Image (cartoon, rainbow, N blue to C red):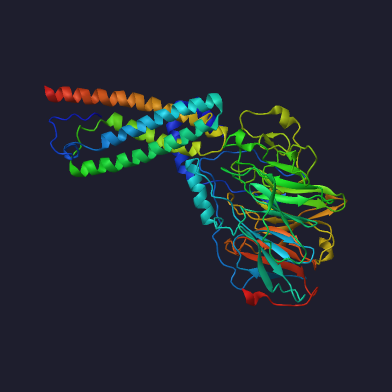
Amino acid sequence: MTITSRSIPDRMDLPFRGEPIHPTLASFPIAYFTAAFVTDLAYWRTAAVQWEIFSDWLITAGLVMSGFAVIAFVIDLVRGKRSPPLAWPHAIGYALAVLLSLLNAFVHSRDGYTAVVPTGLTLSGLVVVILLITGWAGRAQIARRREGADL
Amino acid sequence: MMHFVKIAHSAPRLAVVAIAGLGLAGCFDNGGDPKVQIGANPVLPPLQQYLVPPIRIAKVVPWGKETPTAPQGMQVQALATGFEHPRQLYVLPNGDVLVVEANGPEAPINRPKDLVMIWAQWLAGAAAKGGNRITLLRDTKGDGTFDQRTVFLDHLNSPFGVALVGQDFYVANTDAIVRYPYKEGQTSITAPGTKLTDLPGGPIDHHWTKSLLASPDGSKLYVGVGSNSNITENGIQAEYERAAIWEVDRASGAHRIFASGLRNPTGLAWEPETSKLWAVVNERDEIGPDLVPDYLTSVQDGGFYGWPYSYYGQHLDPRVRPQRPDLVAKAIAPDYALSSHVAPLGVVMTAGTGLPASYRSGAFVSEHGSWDRSPLNGYKVVFVPFSGGRPSGQAQDVVTGFLDANNHARGRPVGMAVDRSGGLLIADDLANIVWRVSSKGSEPQHDSSESR
């Protein structure tokens, strides 16, 4: 997830040459999807439509950014910058969260209350749970690998 | 809906169903026979909710040399062509025909879905720019050809309904009723208008058309004001004094809500036998190809007709929060269903026209045609026979052929009017033509097809 610079870059483009692009982009949807769960909760409690509209755009923005992340991932693969080693639980969980969010975008495209309650809200919550679990699992795996490499 | 409610309670199965749901995302159920939804007691299936809003747009093709078709003994001709989105027609006392050319104001993009809807409208040819003007057509020789054409009123703001009372000509723009002085024989109005009253307009203005009808004694104007959403997705605040028929006092401009709960009352007419107000109303979308049937109904003073809380009396719509059981309890079921998603945009009550005798008593209803139902529905003008001031039988197709044999749309009927010689005029906002339907041999023969 995190980018660790080993030396201070002396040119602006150095970080992009040296590091993969996709982890940075991939973190945007996590923020958007989590925020959408919060605005869904707000809509559920208030039935005020501005929260539902927030959720719509947040989920859409998350999907757009995850699309960019996928493109960046492919570019990173081609450039051979696939480091740190891909954490599979993380990647699978992430992909599942994006797919569920795509489904959620369709549910949220409905008009009125049932755009959120109960299915949209459930999906938003599920996405956050998946992201939390896989984020933690993926990080743990990366940490183990790093430790292994250090030994 | 049901299986989604189940998902909510069985999270582990969700992933499986989610993937299955994505696979199904491109398909939607076909609607049944519209005939079972025509009349006083339409069959109403259980409601369903979609993953993908159903969009079924008819491909747009030109009429070429063809015209809409009418039953034996009648003919259809193009009265005039080359309009900019003609929506409404009005016949002045001297026989001049007014063509209101308009489209809605630019819709704001509030939700990602709005982008899809704008695309769908463009695909359907419904996004064409409106003229924002009224064109006058005159038959100077009295031979049935309207040979003179002038701009009657220009620079309007999405006008739809118009009405003449004495020497006062009223235009229902999307945001106000404006009065203009008119003298018989005038071919254009240059005098500035005077605002009679504001009407609910932007910034959302989801249903922008304001239908207009003067009371027989000329003291009141009745205005059909459509809802600001499909089903309150823009918030209930946005619906203030909408989805209603207003009664506007012509002298003061003051208004009251004559009837409410009418999602989009696009056409108003007086029933000649009983002098009661009738309306055609466009009902809600996205709960199934056979929900909710659009309708023709008498409008009771103070009546509430369900929207948004319920439809056809007490059928609840789960998409509306908070719900209003108090209003639902008094919701009136409409008189006559026209079947689902036909989009009735015009109604004309007959009182002895130049059409065959079988059309003397009843209502012509123009069905603009569905955009969210498969198979397509509407795209024709039907006649609902009346007797004793009430619908008395099955609606009959009168003017068809707006869809060709391949289900491509050549035209879409909107506003209608009866001209001085009794012909039925129909505005076609897709082909930009005004059609005239008449009995064969009822008038001097002429061929206006050359003008096309």
- The image position of residue B325, as x and y in percent, is 70, 28
In the displayed structure image, the side of residue B380 where residue B54 appears, left or right:
left
- The image position of residue A3, as x and y in percent, is 21, 30
Residue B245 vertical position relative to residue B9 in the rendered view, above or below: below
Q: Which of A145/B122 is in front?
A: B122
Dividing the picture into quadrants, the one containing residue B230 is: top right
Q: Which of B261/A69 is in front?
A: B261
Task: Kindly identify the residue that appears in the image at 32 percent across and 26 percent down.
Answer: A134
Dividing the picture into quadrants, the one containing residue A68 is: top left
- The image position of residue B245, as x and y in percent, is 73, 43
Residue B292 vertical position relative to residue B317 in the rendered view, above or below: below
Q: Quadrant of the C terminus of chain B?
A: bottom right
In the displayed structure image, the side of residue B23 where residue B299 appears, left or right:
right
User: Taking the image as drawn, is residue B268 in sight?
Assistant: no
In the displayed structure image, the side of residue B122 where residue B452 appears, left or right:
right
Q: Which of B254/A144 is in front?
A: B254
User: Taking the image as drawn, is residue B265 in sight?
Assistant: yes
Residue A34 vertical position relative to residue B70 in the rendered view, above or below: above
Dividing the picture into quadrants, the one containing residue B187 is: bottom right
Outermost residue, front side? B191
Q: Quadrant of the N terminus of chain B?
A: top right
- The image position of residue B386, as x and y in percent, is 83, 53
In the displayed structure image, the side of residue B390 where residue A74 appears, left or right:
left
Q: Could you tell me how many numbered marks the image carries?
A: 0
Task: Kindly identify the residue that appears in the image at 57 percent across and 62 percent down.
Answer: B408
Task: Kindly identify the residue that appears in the image at 55 percent across and 52 percent down.
Answer: B56
